[in-house]
Amino acid sequence: MTATVPIPTLAATTPPGPLREFWISFSANKGAVMGLVVVVLLLLVALFAPWLAPHVPDETNSAAFLKPPAWQDGGMPQYLLGTDAIGRDILSRLIFGARLSLSIGLAVVLLSVVVGIALGLIAGFARGVVEIAIMRLMDIVLTLPSLLLAIVIVAILGPGLVNAMLAVAVVVLPHYVRITRAAVIAEVSRDYVTAARISGASTLRLMFSEVLPNCAAPLIVQASLGVSTAILDAAALGFLGLGAQPPSPEWGTMLADAREFVLRAWWVVTFPGLAILLAVLAFNLMGDGLRDALDPKLKR
């Protein structure tokens, strides 16, 4: 009786697809997976804030000024993380603050990515005087301290949430312009761009159909890291009174409102600070994982 030799199946010899290969590389970084989980949880909290928050964020209770967390002596069960100086539930304000802070981060990144890609493509394709003018302007912006520049812009436009978002978008814009321009210069010399140009492709088609898709990887990584920077800068502006204005439950504004109670009510400062720390750390960890998974040189 002869032994049968197993025939290899097609599934065993077929290489993994791009998405599976990306997930294998991304999931190898445990910190990145943890960051992704935290980001997804924050997005869900922000999305379902009206149903998750136990109280209305601006609702005050004159009988519950500066109440400590529920597990501490003097705490109240209905206020799990305590209350602030005018009796507002800190947990509810943190939950609604996640919606506001994440919206700021995503809106800033979206605006800066769109404008940065447009300027980077123009600089990479036009070259000459146009490129020099765009890149020198970006260099000037980069030479200024980011927070100081944001403060100056808000001081000119006036304090407010929208103006703070515009200021932060201007501050982070040069990073996207430089990344896009460098990727475009590297791609335009490749054979597929030359072939498309010879076949009669217009400049706009070369920009958006041929070159831009191959420049997406570094932009995705920078965008994921840029959300954390935007959240941090917006919180700093809110802390200085130049961003979101009270009674908005933005995390930086919550820190500003709690400054005078630091020594006698630790919870009014600690929990908003931990929320900012958790969000920034999660986006940074996820960005590191995306960089490892999308850069062929760094794939494990």
Image (spheres, grey):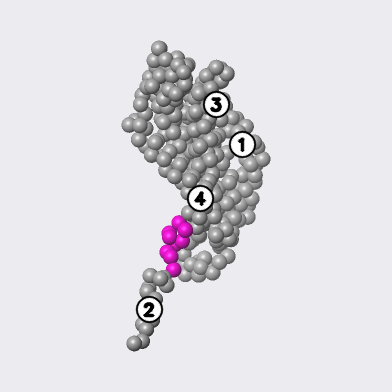
Going by the numbered disc 1, the residue's amino acid type is Ser
Quarter of image, res 62: top left
Residue 83, horizontal then vertical, whole percent:
44, 20
Of the 4 image quadrants, the one containing the C terminus is bottom right
In-front residue for pair 141/47:
47
Nearer to us: label 3 or label 2: 2
Q: Vertically, is 249 above or below 216?
A: above
Magenta part of the protein: which range?
15-24
Going by the numbered disc 2, the residue's amino acid type is Pro
Question: What residue is pinned by disc 3?
Answer: 239
Mark closer to the chain start, 3 or 1: 1
Distance of label 3 from label 2 (alpha carbons): 68 Å
Question: What residue is pinned by disc 4?
Answer: 30
Quick one: SS at disc 4? helix
Q: Is residue 21 magenta?
A: yes
Q: Vertically, is 179 above or below 17?
A: above
